[in-house]
Image (cartoon, helix red, strand yellow):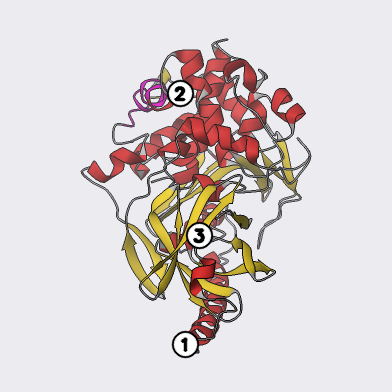
Amino acid sequence: MIGSNTKAFTATALAMLDAEKKISLDDNVTKWIPQFKLDNKAAGEQAIIRDLLCHRIGFQTFQGDFTYWTSNLTRTEVIEKMSHIKAQYPFRTKWGYTNAAFLTAGEIIPKASGLQWEEYLKEKIFTPLGMNSTLALSKDFPNALNKCSAHTMADGKLVKIPFCSIDNLAAAGSIGSSVNDMSHWVMAQLSGGKYDGKQAIPASAIAQTWLPHSILGNGGKQFNTGHFALYGLGWFLEEYCGKKVVSHTGGVNGFVTSVTLIPEEKLGIIVFTNTDQNSFYEALKWEIADAYLGKPYRNYSKVYLGFYNQQKQNDAKTDRKMQDSVALHLATSLTATNYCGTYTNDVYGTMNVVQEGAELKMKFSHHPNMYAKLESIGGNRFYATFSDPEFSKAIFPFTVENGKVVSVTVKVADFIEYNPYEFKKVK
């Protein structure tokens, strides 16, 4: 599964429709999806398709993703939920990576072409490029004949996990592919849309996606002499050793991937891995780029591994500390039944805390197959362990007023969303 490397396909598809004059990338989103709204009313009315594709609608990176990620919400419900999110930034002032925006953009494709997003990609991109082993939807991945298994780290061990179901965010990250198929995509990108002697993608569509739209910062990596970091439409844009680099990464449960283009060198680098707990997919691409550009060997793998091991040690230390607190069987401020009940969050919806035997569990309306086990660490604080290791572990503090529980703060792994959610108790 290639994760967010899907985004360049979605942006290219819309740029192709723009080249055919079926849409304009400067169309208001509401022209095609009248029900599209944002909490900032003016922003919702003014947002154009480009805003969705370059992450500048005002949301913080990953904002809202806990609500959407592997949830049972439909695409239509995801778009509606966006109107409940209070944007962190003023409209078009800062870049914030927004998966739901790409899903919304993808839903314009059927309105303009008569083909569903997945159908359009297959007919207009995959087939012309000979990408015969590529799947648009995650629902089809488990039935593929030749596929990698997904892995993550849980309690210090590498474990196999189920394939994630994210077709409600399809246009943001659901494609499954192979290095062989993706090499066809990369060759077309590097040759102005041509593949196997034919113009598979209009050159103007590729140019649109490579056009800088958002400013990320000054750029610069560990050994990078670059001077800028930008975002086009579905692609990161930067400079490395005087060369333009067009790239993206992708991460879904059990997989992290990278696709990198250095157009002046006609170089494409594709790295796919089937564990989401590694930085090798980034380290290897820089090793290859340096070798190709005649730069000294810098051992990116060792550098990235150092960062990874440090984070792993920090996380293990925190977990041990929390497990030690749990082992003390510290008393809660109130009896367990006081924490039980129904809670709501305007963005997410409903959550229930229930007692099953001696255990307290938190169950989420839009993630029916997942729960969080709550273990007391004293007072009104619990150490929460999600049944899905991708959502990780965290401290959940309950707020108590006049002897009654009024709310709880829920936090999932940064891999999914950085922002905490406050759920208010309703009964």
- Mark 3 Cα within 10 Å, few/some/many (few <14, many 20+)? some
Q: Residue furthest bottom?
A: 328
Q: Is residue 387 left or right of residue 34?
A: left
Q: Nearer the viewer, residue 298 or 369?
A: 369
> Is 298 drawn above or below residue 248 in the view shown?
below
Which residue was labeled with disc 1? 327
Q: Is residue 263 left or right of residue 392?
A: right
Which residue is rendered at x = 46% and y = 14% of the image? 113
Q: Amino acid at mark 2?
A: Lys
Residue 340, percent from left and from top:
49, 64
Can residue 232 be seen? no
Q: Is residue 145 left or right of residue 306?
A: left
Q: Which mark, residue 194?
A: 2
Residue 10, percent from left and from top:
50, 30
Q: Secondary structure at mark 3?
A: strand
Which residue was labeled with disc 3? 341
> How would you classify the magenta stretch by its main secondary structure?
helix
The mark lying in front, picked from 2 and 1, is 1
Mark 2 and mark 3 lie on one chain; the one further toward the N terminus is: 2
Q: Secondary structure at mark 1?
A: helix
Which residue is rendered at x = 43% and y = 33% of the image? 185
Q: Amino acid at mark 3?
A: Gly
